[in-house]
Amino acid sequence: MATKTKKQLITKIAAQTNHHPNEVRLIVQAFLDSITDCLSEGNRLEFRDFGVFEVVTRKQKIGRNPKNASIAIVIPERQAVKFTAGKKMRMVVESEASAMV
């Protein structure tokens, strides 16, 4: 498996849609900025068949330093973004994963 960058995604979309990469980059960046803005306001984003983004609160917990397990470290409560894959995405990813085995 390889890591894909935003630039590679933009290049692929530009080739598929016959749009200039600069146009696609502006649209992709505006989309990502909108997602960030919505989540920072505490909203839940749902994209049918793709998945759901939502802000959740991670409770405070006690962690351990692997080098010195006798010392407890308090990890404070924090907000985090949770993504849950939609049904169609889950099915596609699972079928691709089983094909690689």
Image: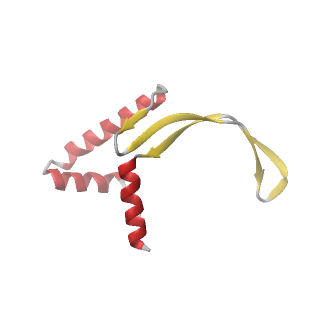
Can residue 64 be seen from the camera position used here?
yes
Q: Nearer the viewer, residue 45 or 37?
A: 45
Give the x, y percent position of residue 88: 35, 51
Q: Residue at x 34, y 45 (%)?
A: 49
Q: Residue at x 24, y 55 (%)?
A: 11
Q: Residue lying at the far bottom in this picture: please name it.
A: 101
Give the x, y percent position of residue 67: 79, 59
Q: Nearer the viewer, residue 90 or 56?
A: 90
Q: Is residue 19 above or below residue 99?
A: above
Q: Residue lying at the far top in this picture: please name it.
A: 41
Q: Is residue 46 above or below residue 1?
A: above
Q: Nearer the viewer, residue 85 or 25?
A: 85
Q: Residue at x 38, y 56 (%)?
A: 91
Give the x, y percent position of residue 94: 42, 61
Q: Quadrant of residue 52?
A: top left
Horizontal relation, residue 14 to residue 90: left or right:
left
Can residue 1 be seen from the camera position used here?
no
Q: How is the image coloured?
A: secondary structure
Q: Nearer the viewer, residue 86 or 14?
A: 86
Q: How many marks?
A: 0
Q: Residue at x 35, y 39 (%)?
A: 47
Horizontal relation, residue 19 to residue 65: left or right:
left
Q: Is residue 87 above or below residue 48?
A: below
Q: Residue lying at the far right in this picture: please name it.
A: 70
**Quarter of the image that includes the C terminus:** bottom left
Give the x, y percent position of residue 8: 30, 57
Q: Is residue 28 above or below residue 95?
A: above
**Quarter of the image that includes the N terminus:** bottom left
Q: Quadrant of residue 28?
A: top left
